[in-house]
Amino acid sequence: MLKPRHIGIVACSAEGAALCYRTVCSEGAALLGRHAHPEVSLHTFSLADYVHRLDANDLRGVADLMLKSAHKLAAAGADFLVCPDNTIHQALAFVEAASPLPWLHIAEVVAAEAASRGYRRLGLLGTRWLVDSNVYPEKLNVRGIACTRPSDAERDETSRIIMDELVCGRVDPSSVEYLQSVIRNFRNQGCEAVVLGCTEVPLIIGDQGSCLPTLDSTRLLARAALQCAVTPDLAPARTRGGPPARPAG
């Protein structure tokens, strides 16, 4: 068997990146044998550096951090890159043309999984930065899948839970109940499943805690990275695209 490709993880928040890393390592054995997984390197700047740029609506500044991580990971020997953070995918189009390595796109991975399950309408959980953006609607629409966003009040409270609690590794039972109520509202609006579009949300909610089937963006990305690492004809292609639209709000 050929040596698996080296996976580079461009991290943003610690909890989501750790879950992605653990998934690659723990599930690699099913493909490669006991205790085996592809080589993995991870780099991140301080989360505060990203938050500062997101608050300033500075997507080019976000892209600059991502690109610097990409170059560090290329120097470490990575063959391709993943970013287990949905929010900063808003800036990926500014990164790809100058990137030393190709990327897997988290929303494309989720959209492919949703299409394979036959879903036609999804709810989207995530930070306000993400939910106000076109990261998911754009990738879902290509596959004929509608995207339902939370209300403004739900976006604000969900974002607070993510940034004040989940990225810090805190779990408040009342916050879990709140996110479950947002998912119930998605169901009432005709959604067939919900995208866990914050890479920390799968740590507290999954299919067993949700009234709708869940699409776990973190683990789906990790599994897609594993497949690309071990399957020669699944190497991620370099993509080219124009800059992303500025997020609303």
Image (cartoon, grey):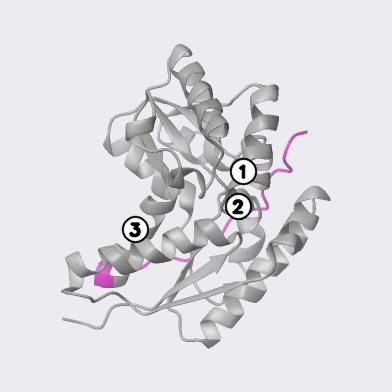
Q: Is residue 234 above or below residue 219?
A: below
Q: Are marks 1 and 3 in contact (CB under 8 Å)?
A: no
Instruction: Give how far apart the Cα atoms at labels 3 and 2 are.
Output: 23 Å
Dot 3 or dot 2: first in sequence order is: 2
- Crowding near pointer 1: few (<14 within 10 Å), some, many (20+)? many
- Crowding near pointer 3: few (<14 within 10 Å), some, many (20+)? some
Is 238 part of what is drawn in magenta?
Answer: yes
Q: In the image, 233: left or right of 123?
A: left
Amino acid type, residue under disc 1 in the picture: Ile
Give the residue at mark 1: 162
- In the rendered image, the residue lying farthest to the top is 188
Residue 225 visible here: no
Q: Residue at x 56, y 30 (%)?
A: 174
Instruction: Give how far apart the Cα atoms at labels 1 and 3 are.
Output: 24 Å
Q: Position of residue 85 (x, y in %)?
A: 55, 54
Dot 1 or dot 2: first in sequence order is: 1
- In the rendered image, the residue lying farthest to the right is 56
Give the residue at mark 2: 167
Find numbered disc 1 in the image and state the secondary structure of the residue it sits on.
helix
Instruction: Give how far apart the Cα atoms at labels 1 and 2 are.
Output: 6 Å
Res 142 → quadrant? top left
Amino acid type, residue under disc 2 in the picture: Val
Labels 3, 2: front one: 2
Q: Main secondary structure of the magenta part?
A: loop
Find numbered disc 2 in the image and state the secondary structure of the residue it sits on.
helix
Q: Are marks 1 and 2 in contact (CB under 8 Å)?
A: yes
Q: Magenta part of the protein: which range?
A: 230-249
Which of these two is toward me, 143 or 23? Answer: 23
Q: Residue at x 43, y 17 (%)?
A: 187
Q: In the image, 185: left or right of 63?
A: left
Q: Position of residue 136 (x, y in %)?
A: 53, 39
